[in-house]
Image: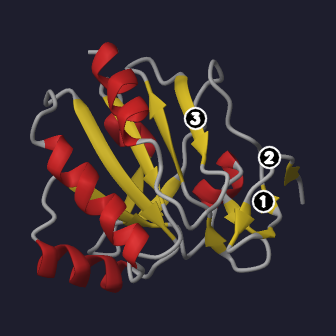
Amino acid sequence: MEKNKTKVTFKGNYITLLGTEAKPGMKAPDFTVLGKALNPVKLSDYKGKVVILSIFPSIDTGVCATQTRTFNKEAANLSSEIAILGISNDLPFALGRFCGAEGIDKVETLSDHKETDFGLKYGYLIEELRLLTRGSIVIDKEGVIQYVEYVPEATNEPNYVMALEVAKSLV
């Protein structure tokens, strides 16, 4: 199994990221994850849109909940040509419960739990925990990665401003 060489810590301890490191300029690999109704959702379903991937370990933690709420709030100010996908290894039921309780309606939350297809293709899968590390990726309308963040300490929030600025510049 390929290991991503990016240095990331979780609660101060270094973790091992599995998969291929995502980098700006590379073609975004298609992936399949599960929607809230257990339906397959692919990156290619968003062809022709700018896509922000908001990646997090678990919706049931404070920082992950804040990340999802923040991107959901910011989505109200974005063009309809920008889609925000929240991806974690949480079960689709947990994601659906959270979004229902919190009124999350602009970020589409998706589960990589079943096959870890996203985590391995983008180098976000934490070997020690089988969770995704925190970060964000912006993909342009042509399917090319324009911005990548692996948050150095996975318990910290991502750089929302950078991801949103890059996405807005691509519309």
Q: Which label sits in the foreground, 2 or 1? A: 2
Q: Residues within 10 Å of mark 2 (few under 14, many from 20)?
A: some
Vertical comparison of 79 with 73: above or below: above
Amino acid carrying mark 1 in the image: Leu
Q: State the separation of the CA atoms marked 1 and 3.
A: 15 Å
Quadrant of the drawing holding the N terminus: bottom right
x 66%, y 46%: residue: 122
Query: Do callouts 3 and 2 mark residues in contact (Cβ within 8 Å)?
Result: no
Say which label, 1 or 3, has the lower sequence index: 1
Q: State the separation of the CA atoms marked 2 and 1.
A: 7 Å
Query: Do callouts 1 and 3 mark residues in contact (Cβ within 8 Å)?
Result: no
Q: Secondary structure at mark 3?
A: strand
Q: Position of residue 15 (x, y in %)?
A: 80, 67
Residue carrying label 3: 148
Instruction: Give the farthest residue toward the front.
Output: 12
Left/right placement of residue 124 relative to residue 36 reads: right
x 27%, y 50%: residue: 71
Amino acid carrying mark 2 in the image: Thr
Say which label, 3 or 2, has the lower sequence index: 2
x 79%, y 78%: residue: 128
Left/right placement of residue 82 relative to residue 170 reads: left
Q: Position of residue 35 (x, y in %)?
A: 33, 67
Q: State the separation of the CA atoms marked 3 and 2.
A: 12 Å
Determine the image quadrant of residue 53.
top left
Q: Nearer the viewer, residue 120 or 163?
A: 163
Q: Secondary structure at mark 1?
A: strand
Residue carrying label 1: 17
Query: Do callouts 2 and 1 mark residues in contact (Cβ within 8 Å)?
Result: yes
